[in-house]
Amino acid sequence: MEDNSLPLNDFHVKKTNLLLNRLHMFLHGIALLSLFYYRITTLIHNDNIPLLPYILVFITELILSFIWLLSQASNWKPITRKVYIERLPENEKLPSIDVFICTADPNKEPSLGVMNTIISALALDYPSDNNKLNVYLSDDGGSFVTLLAVKEAWKFAKFWISFCRKYEVMNRCPEAYFLNEEIGDVRKFDRSHEFVLDKKEIEKKYDEFKDCLVKIVAGTSTIVSKDHPPLIEVISDSKDQAMDSDKEEMPLLVYVAREKRPSHHHNFKAGALNVLLRVSGLISNSPYILVLDCDMYCNDPTSARQAMCFHLDSKLSPKLAFVQFPQTFANISETDIYDGQWRYLWQKWHGLDGIGGPILSGTGFYIKRKALYGIQNVQEDVDLIQLQKSFGSSNEFIKSVYTINKPNIRNFSDDSTLQKEIQFLASCSYDKDTNWGEKVGFRYFTIVEDYFTGFNLHREGWISVYIEPSRPCFLGASPISLGEFLIQNTKWLVGLMQVGLSRFSPLLYGSLRMSTLQIMGYAEFAYVPLCFSYIYCLAIVPQLCLLRGIALYPPVSSPFFLVFSFLFLSSQLKHVQEVLSTGHSIQTWANEQRFWMMKSATCFLFATLEATMEKFGLTKVSFLPTNKVVDVEQAKLYQMGIYDFQAPPLFMVPLCSLYILNVASFFIGLVKILQDQKGNEMFVQAFIPFFGMVLFFPLFEGMVLRTDKGRVSPFVSIVSCVISIIILFLALVFSY
């Protein structure tokens, strides 16, 4: 670690955002207290209010206010960071890095995309001599297709890496490079004749590589195995390299298929990552690890050097667990109708960075191996039995734990003892009766291993940092259909609720170990699915009371009407300010509002139900990889900014039912208001369905106006109409 006179990084507080956030926090908080005062005094002094709907509305307002309060932690001190990679030590003094990439199913995760991610990682701008860069692929499906594809990727990568280094190519994902070569991507060479010839040659080799993958997929079974022994293979041609000393040294590439047996629980992605952690410990044993999703390729080859600007900082490094980069997606359209860019999320990460660090985010992070091992709590001279309780029964692996900063490269192919030991580390029973997944490695308990692992690291006293360079360091593919996006979000939210409903709840488990603001930051994500109650209550109760002429909100003439008006405008204008400050438009605000309500009515509800049932042993949480195969029709609709409503009926029926209910309630309620002349008393309750009706006009189009493939299916529309009619009929019957 270098103690440079000049800093490797610096940061500054976003003062304008800080002031606006705290001012909004104060004013909005005062307004919420006024709302509570109004609700409580009305309950005490007004005997004529309908108790059940009034209490329901009040409870959901309390829930939403609770989530809002938790969310203020990420607004408290937003910061931005900058790095100076030119100040890093020489290549020979840089520490080694292991790259972990996980895949599970070649049917849902096409081999070409996975191989492009691998190739881009092998081509990172980082020294590869002395095994300072090593790439590991976890194939959880144990697919022969993937193994063959990895071998072909290795062959092509030898030429690709040489080309990238020679011409200082920035975009080192070959598929992305050839599809859209950036202006100025090749620096200094001014597109010389030599470059043109070399580019044609490398493009030809890439086409041959793709043709080879097509033949492999066509001629090999893509069945995913759930019952197979461990297979670890170092992909290399060391004999050829030994014969040709002029060849550039390549990074190490290792294929890992851990043992899978139907009788063993495999702990999802966390289990796969822990196997890579152990296997790499006996092969390369790098002190730092980059974790990537199989569809998240390296878009900026300097990401490793940027991360080292933090990990090699003498002030930060002793307590720094990981450096998080944002997840950015190359296939997001300008309209982003599904909120796929997660703009709001990365804005929160800037705020969390100011109070101890961002949450671990699944991919695009450089993490310290020492932090994952938890060896700060385990002394080297402790009893061997205690060490085996922590790290398992492999003495070879235990030795590697305390030599993290010393390369542990050995000839895997020629060492049968090492091969057996590594296969033992990849066995499905190695974790049994150890601290793996509890205190060591990536944590199990929940399917959101990233959130839970980061939470435990912060609880143990580690910090993290967040950096968002102008050029995205990693680019992936976001779902471009409503169904896939809702399924993906539900999966994540189930995991968050698992934590929130358990003894690991941030509000309890984090107390006394973390700052109050950090606890709030983690708790917001653990409990945000509870917002489903607010959406359902706000979309049903005021509307039914509108039909019955029952007021749940203060009249326009009341001073408290200003309180409710201020709260609505305050939240919406704050959202608009955040959107505009990040360079987006009002259209982005509308898309985010719409999709947040969609998720609340579907993902939040089903995640809460599934996590609750799992808590009581009524079901088991499952995990399926997101389908990354691109549907041409869906892609066309997405690029046009048109919703694809061919989502599962389980998601669409609640959305359509609530929409129909609000439209009908608004028009019927408007007639009753005009007849009874109650505009003063019922204005708020008429405005609520009107706002939802306008915001969700695309849903009306999908049910009524559209005839294309992406419209709402007639079955969903009919079922939704029946449900809405039943609810409205009961409300009208009981109103008389």
Image (cartoon, rainbow, N blue to C red):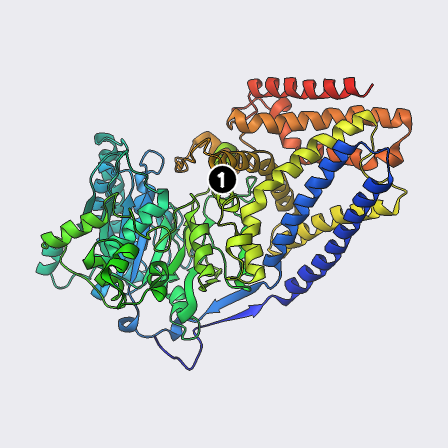
Quarter assignment of residue 195? bottom left
| Residue 147 screen position, x and y as percent | 22, 42
Asked if 189 appears above or below 54 in the picture, the reply is below
| Residue 66 screen position, x and y as percent | 65, 49
Q: Residue at x 58, y 63 (%)?
A: 78
Circle 1 packing at 10 Å, graded few (<14), some (14-19), many (20+), is: many
Q: Is residue 314 visible?
A: yes
Q: Is residue 188 visible?
A: no
| Residue 582 screen position, x and y as percent | 60, 55
| Residue 44 screen position, x and y as percent | 83, 42
Q: Residue at x 65, y 33 (%)?
A: 536
Left or right side of 279 for 461: right
Indicate the amino acid at tag 1: Val
Q: Residue at x 54, y 47 (%)?
A: 526
Nearer to us in this view, 475 or 365: 365
Left or right side of 706 for 232: left
The kind of secondary structure element at disc 1 is helix
Left or right side of 681 for 101: left
Circle 1 sits on which residue?
A: 494
